[in-house]
Image (cartoon, grey):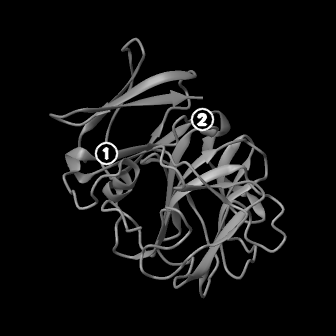
Amino acid sequence: AQIPSYVPTTGLIGYWPFSGNANDVSGNGHNGTVNGALLTTNRIGTNNSAYSFLNATIQMGGFPFSLTSDFTFAFWQKLNVYESSKVIFELNQSLACNMNPQIYQFNNCVNLATCITPANDVCMGTSSNLVNQWTFFCCTHTGGKTKIFRDGMLVDSMMYTWPVTGVTDLTLGNEGHSSKTHPSNIVLDDIGIWNMVLKNNEIIALYNGLTSGIEDENMYPVFCLYPNPGSQVVTLEISDKFIGSDYFISDITGRSMQTGKLNVLINLIHFDDFNAGIYFITFGRENKKTIKLIKN
């Protein structure tokens, strides 16, 4: 197997397409050790091109970067059954549970959390939207902020202080520490880790299977709204071409609810006095953009 053309190679630590085995095709030699996982059909129907986990793990490790530095990880998943407290993906060092990144199932969500500290959970998607569905997740980390993308779109972000690691290891399908008592019933595919933050267009390319060298911003979202649904305030991130433009929020009947101006790249929009329902945020100048906003 070879690295697909749409996978960014700059900063690539390891890439595992699971095409018949758990080998790393990046050339860095971080081949996975399979413990009970079975090859199965991937998201496009190719046999023996993804791994099914049930009381199983795949482990790979010795990555030469620290969790305090910039990094990105990405993977495709199909959750067969939602089971609370079951672990899907964990980065750690020497199988330690030490405030390290962990993706697990809890409170009817798949969450990004710190191992042992569920108070820092961020819901990446609910079970109703993830069970029996292939979903692409990508997380980037820089400057203490971890951003979470689902199917190419930013869904949330949070400040995390990950531990200092001399090297970093990865466990799939279960927790990384030695007890391994929380296995997920899941299918995983196309795992990638980078020691840098991928650009938005590179994340979209991984999701769509497009060549990562394409730089035409018209082919990619140049804005992100999160969390969505929201309850009191949402963050609208824009590219510099939208700075200075007005925004308008309307309800489903077209009635104007709120107006304002986008003066910075990251804008906080408060809507706590809105009733629960569906709204639309429109912004821009000649080429206006409209995003659906759901108020809980």
Amino acid marked by disc 2: Asn
Disc 1 and disc 2: Cα gap in Å? 22 Å
Q: Amino acid at mark 1?
A: Pro
Horizontally, is 128 left or right of 36 in the view?
left
Q: Quadrant of the C terminus?
A: top right
Q: Nearer the viewer, residue 88 or 53?
A: 53
- Looking at this view, is 183 or 56 the one in front? 56
Residue drawn at x 52%, y 50% as measured from the top left: 47
The x and y percentages for residue 52 are 65, 53
Q: Which mark is residue 221?
A: 1
Looking at the image, which residue is at 21% across and 57% down? 215
Q: Quadrant of residue 101?
A: bottom right
Tell me if residue 115 comes above or below residue 224 in the rendering. below
Q: Picture quarter containing residue 99? A: bottom right
Q: Is residue 219 visible?
A: yes
89 to 237, vertically: above or below: below
Q: Quick one: SS at disc 2?
A: helix
Q: Secondary structure at mark 1?
A: loop
Which residue of the protein is positioned furthest toward the bottom in this rendering? 166
x, y (%) of residue 117? 76, 62
Residue 128 in picture, x, y percent from top left? 65, 33
Q: Is residue 169 visible?
A: no
Q: Is residue 289 left or right of residue 48?
A: left
Tell me the crowding category of disc 2: few under 14, some 14 to 19, or many 20 or more residues within 10 angstroms, Cα based: few
Residue 52's disc is none
Q: Is 255 placed above or below 4 here?
A: above
Question: Looking at the image, is mark 1 or mark 2 earlier in the sequence?
Answer: 2
> Where's the N terminus, which quadrant?
bottom left
Instruction: Using the image, tell me which numbered label, if any, was put on residue 129.
Output: 2
**Which residue is painted at 22% across and 50% down in the image?**
217
Q: Kindly identify the residue that appears in the image at 73 percent across and 66 percent down.
A: 115
